[in-house]
Amino acid sequence: MSKVHPVRSHSVAAAGGINAAIAIDDDWTEHAYDTVKGSDFLGDQDAIEIMCSEAPGEAMHLEHIGVTFHRNEKGELDLRAFGGASKKRTAYVADITGQAILHVLYEQLMRHHLTVDRYEEWFATSLILDDDGVCAGAVARDIRSGAMEVFDAKSVILANGGNGQCYKPTTNALICTGDGIAQAYRIGAPIMDMEMVQYHPTTLAENGFLITEGARGEGAHLLNSEGRRFMEDYAPSKMELASRDVVSRAEQTEINEGRGVGADGQGIYLDVTVVPKKRVLEALREIVNIGRDFAGTDITREPIMIRPGQHYIMGGVKTDVDGQTPITGLYAAGEVACVSVHGGNRLGANSLLDTLIFGRRSGEHAANRGKDMAMPHAPASRMREDAMMISDILDRPRDGRRLSEIKDELGTTMNEHVAVYRDEDGLNTAHETVHRLKEEASKAYVDDHGSVFNQDVLGALEVGYMLDCAEATIVSAIDRKESRGAQFRLDYPERRDEEWLKHINVTRGADGEPEISYSPVTITKWQPEVRKY
Amino acid sequence: MAEYTLRLRRYDPESGDAPYWEEHTIELEPHRSVLEGILQAKARFDGSIGIRCSCRAAICGSCGVRINGRPDLACHTHLDKAERRAKDGIIEVEPMGNMPVIKDLIVDMEAVHWKKIRRVTPWLIAKQPVPVREYIVPRESMVDVTQSMACIQCGACVSDCLSMEVDPKFIGPAALAKAYRFVGDPRDDQHFERLKDLAEDPHGIYDCTHCFACIDACPKDVAPMSQIMRLRRRAGNDFNIEDRNNGERHESAFVSLVKQYGLLNEAELLPRSYGGDTPLAKFKPSVALEMATTLPAIARALLRRKVTPAAVLKPHKLPKQDLAAVRRIYDEVEGREQRAEFNIYISGKDEDR
């Protein structure tokens, strides 16, 4: 079930590739170490070992079902360099890897149409627990007709992505509104690592669109207003290919210290002209288009202005290595989930991998679990409640704020106070704002009163999900009094392992307010060390 | 900031009213997209405006619409450019063509586009045995299919396919481009079967009239018509598939007539399309029968002076040096070891280094 046609899902935007240690001179343990280090040691190492050791098999499976991975001269899978990686280990399809994988997976859905039913353009409104607290299905609305239905399910696997729309600007699609995270949170599932929000180092200064890390993987440089490759001051050995949190912070520091470019000094130059043109046209076609269409820049001839921008939510619904949440019958995989393999900072080209590996594992586990189980009967009362909730929204008087204003204020607030650099005052301001926005959102009216494709009323539900996610992010960021990975606290600039080498979990308390608890980080092989690139 | 006026085609299926136009004035920088304009109208004035959209960056394929009568992604069209092309300074946005409208700018892709995609067996039928590691295939082959892989299934080409307007059963540009993605993939085991199927289908590869509308429409440079022509060359030249639609014979008659005369010889084209690429084709009894069925078309062509009675008796003649120039093109193209195919992902140019 998907609220958009499956090929519109946001995995389509994952440009650069998928990591797998398939080269002869590579080993999955190196991939695992890079991932652990990238996570600033907050990632759970048992899960990271599973992800990295299963990666080569997954890449081969994708290749076998039709993904058109680019090849080297010998006809084998070609690999490109990516940030935070000690070797070239990113398999790719030009710079449309996510699109290629998503479309091929949809091909497989069409192929298996006799055994897999698809509900395209259905919007899940809530998850259902039975009397024993087991997840027994979901309520959903057929967007096209407006009809509501209860779906009984032995297991529910959430695969609905992150909540990047809490930020403005963001590289994320308009559909990334944290539906799954909030729905799980509302039925009592803990959400974890929510303070870890990735800012991608290269988003288009014009409008926040993603410029793939593949550009730097192919050799592009970052330049400040002095025309200097400033990364040599921050990460002398990996330069532009340090971890994303490191590069984004470096850029923000350059900008804050007055060495940014552009009219307002808020940009950095990405210079792709140092990459051979033929290679750019073959392997970075999409960003040639983006540069031309959205910034009026020919990236094969001149540098393009970029800046750090919100990109990925490392946190999500807490799961084990089989995708199981603490709620029986409820699974999560991909950006909606937090296993946690990304910890404080995700490496580029590890998100498709995370989604695929733990998506597969969730599916297999749920299938096995379902074998000897009777189909539960989800209580239909939930559907009536949801139908009532929707009609209440439709009936609201037109005297509150417009939903779009609430969404805008949330986005700009988060981007101002819960961004690359954070401090207590800013976070408290954001918290107060979100509290007020929650109040306002509960009264916001909608214009559309129809049943067919009423995007307006679904938008109201989405804003509610976003506010829950944003609040969890803020309370976690306030609580973590140290700097680690994507969380940099100006008031606590050091990483403090003795106290903070642990995950922050947020659950919804009886009063509806977020409650914080902690869970340990699993360490197998790699003890925390000073992180340098 | 600049002001733009959008004229949106609205349709509410629940109202019982006919579709109508509605204007909204929005304020954005000129390089912002038409989609952002529509979203602003939706945010400020009317949340009920229906449009599918998600990524805003021309990669998810949701927001296919017609802008000033031309298909494109709303997120892929700048406001200033759209305004320049508008006939009265007002940017006109309406739903795509060739597909039923559900609401406002939202069309039923499932009923047309996806149905046609499913027609072409849209998944890899992998060569057996499946290797333990990856299939070893030429580097160029994967770069080559990347162009059709780059299709985002937005439906812009389907919207403006002229053949589909006349023959709604035509498999169409998007689905055929998808078919090339498998026919061009060396890992696929069914190239011949796929090509035969698409050549034999009366609504298949030979139903395309070569009008270029889909190439103009495509926001991702997939060039669906080029992919269709490649399917034809693969079918006709590589697999010698002679289809029952006379498509392959028509194409080879075309090629050899232009080679012989330098220009098309219309009177010869039809008999050869039916009877094979030989001057004797017109004397075959079976051809006479088929020709008879096309008499109304021939009559219309004569009436509209697409062909003249004189041309039937006397073919066009080119000056000698021009004919020689045409033949040189043939020699050049046919003399190549490999057929040259145009592909945006493969660029011979590398002037920098």
Image (spheres, coloured by chain):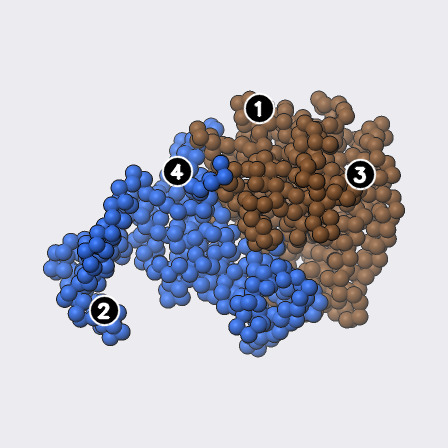
Chain colours: A brown, B blue
| Residue that carries the numbered disc 1 in the rendered image | A26
| Residue that carries the numbered disc 2 in the rendered image | B307
Rendered residue at 65%/47% (across/down): A305
Q: Position of residue B91 (x, y in %)?
A: 57, 69
Residue at mark 2 to residue at mark 1: CA–CA distance: 68 Å
Which mark sits nearer the N-terminus, 3 or 1?
1
| Residue that carries the numbered disc 4 in the rendered image | B186
The residue mark sitting in front, 2 or 1, is 2
Rendered residue at 67%/35% (across/down): A229
Rate crowding at label 4 as few (under 14), some (14 to 19) or many (20 or more) other CA atoms within 10 Å: some
| Residue that carries the numbered disc 3 in the rendered image | A488
The residue mark sitting in front, 2 or 4, is 2
Residue A59, picture quadrant:
top right
The answer to whether tags 4 and 3 share a subunit is: no
Rendered residue at 76%/30% (across/down): A521
Disc 4 sits on a residue from what chain? B
Residue at mark 2 to residue at mark 4: CA–CA distance: 44 Å
- Residue type pointed to by label 3: Phe
The residue mark sitting in front, 4 or 3, is 3
Disc 2 sits on a residue from what chain? B
Rate crowding at label 3 as few (under 14), some (14 to 19) or many (20 or more) other CA atoms within 10 Å: many
The answer to whether tags 2 and 4 share a subunit is: yes
Choose between A113 and A423: the one closer to the eye. A423
